[in-house]
Image (spheres, helix red, strand yellow):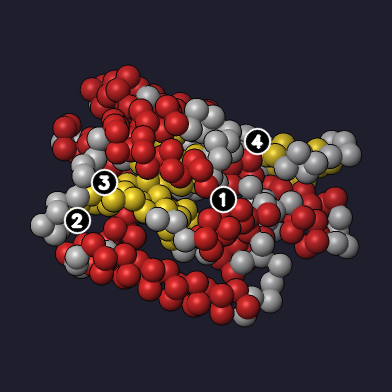
Amino acid sequence: MALGVAIRGFTYRRKVIGIDAAWIKTKHKCVLLVATTQDSEYHSYPTAWGLVDSENNTSWTWFLEKLKDLIPNSSHLCFVSDRYRSIEHEVRLVYVMASHGACYWHVKQNIKHHFKSAVGTKLYKKAAIAYRIEEFNKHFDQLRKTYPRVAKYLENDVKFRKWSRAHFGGNRYEVMTTNIVESVNSLMRKSREYPIIAMIDFIISKMGQWFFERRWEACAVTTPLTPKREEILRKRWDETDSLITLQLNENEYNVMCGEPDAIVNLRLKSCMCKVFDIEKLPCIHAIVAAGKAQPQNTGELIYSMCSQYYT
């Protein structure tokens, strides 16, 4: 099941899809598969639902093939899930152009369970959320020296490209976990005990309620960006006071912020810190460079550099 309004709305959301499964607690003992995205206000946005007899390769292939009829295969798509092998295998089989990332939290729990290492998980977190390869290497080298078994597991079993933001081949923005879909499963904890038809009615009713509430929220917005993104930009703006900027050419600026300095290219919407490149939202270096480039129209320039998914 996929509601038309959810499919149409996908055009305006970042192309990151969280997928997960949850057991149905009725006499049928089936499994509910869910694909969820997220809007720029951090609202979960369920896109498709499927009922299958069990979670296996065949059921995930069927679900993803149905999803592909609505959301075509694209190199801009990114799937995020736990490390259940059927999901990773079938995403690669059905959505051959899309990228797939592992949930940061699930990998962290595996480290805790298998290696009993609390400090190792802290180093893992620093490496996982690092934006730059250099920053990643610094934290992972430390992890390798102090917890070699954990480092070997992350490098050989999980693979850097699955859990490291700096190594990820696609774009998962700041979506590092499956919280966007786990929260939907949590919401349905009680309804998964209902008969199948009653559970579907609950889903449709809840989706209708969400769309009604969020429509009113959207109508109340008076800023160019959504409120959460405006808040992030304002915080970054407040951090630019002490930064010094040197213009290098028509598009590039050197922002002196310590070691290392950041080179910003306003035309390419890129910065050496990689925050701008990954989040598609100007970092503090891009903001201060915009002030240097157009001191009279800084706000307009900053807004023009924001992703369409934040408006």
Q: Position of residue 73 (x, y in %)?
A: 55, 36
What whole-number distance in Å separates the C-alpha atoms at marks 3 and 1?
27 Å
Tag nearer the camera, 4 or 2: 2
Whether residue 269 sits left or right of residue 161 in the image: it is: right
Tell whether label 2 touches label 4 (CB within 8 Å): no
**Quadrant of the snapshot with the N terminus:** bottom left
What whole-number distance in Å separates the C-alpha atoms at marks 1 and 2?
29 Å
Q: Position of residue 213 (x, y in %)?
A: 49, 77
The residue located at (14%, 58%) in the rendering is 25
Give SS at disc 4.
loop
Tell whether label 1 touches label 3 (CB within 8 Å): no
Q: Position of residue 140 (x, y in %)?
A: 39, 28
Whether residue 258 sits left or right of residue 104 in the image: it is: right
In depth, the one of 138 and 89 nearer the eye is 89
What whole-number distance in Å separates the C-alpha atoms at marks 3 and 4?
46 Å
Q: Is residue 206 visible?
A: yes
Tag nearer the camera, 3 or 4: 3
Q: Which residue carries the number 1 mark?
A: 14
Residue 272, numbered label: 4
Whether residue 246 sits left or right of residue 39 in the image: it is: right
As shown in the figure, which amino acid type bears the numbered disc 2? Ile
As shown in the figure, which amino acid type bears the numbered disc 1? Arg
- Displayed quadrant of residue 105: top left
Q: Which residue carries the number 2 mark?
A: 24
Q: Report crowding for label 3: few under 14, some 14 to 19, many 20 or more residues within 10 A (C-alpha).
A: some
Residue 52, numbered label: 3
As shown in the figure, which amino acid type bears the numbered disc 4? Met
Query: Which is nearer the N-term, disc 3 or disc 4?
Result: 3
Query: Which is nearer the N-term, disc 1 or disc 4?
Result: 1
Placement of 173 over or under 181, stated as above or below: above
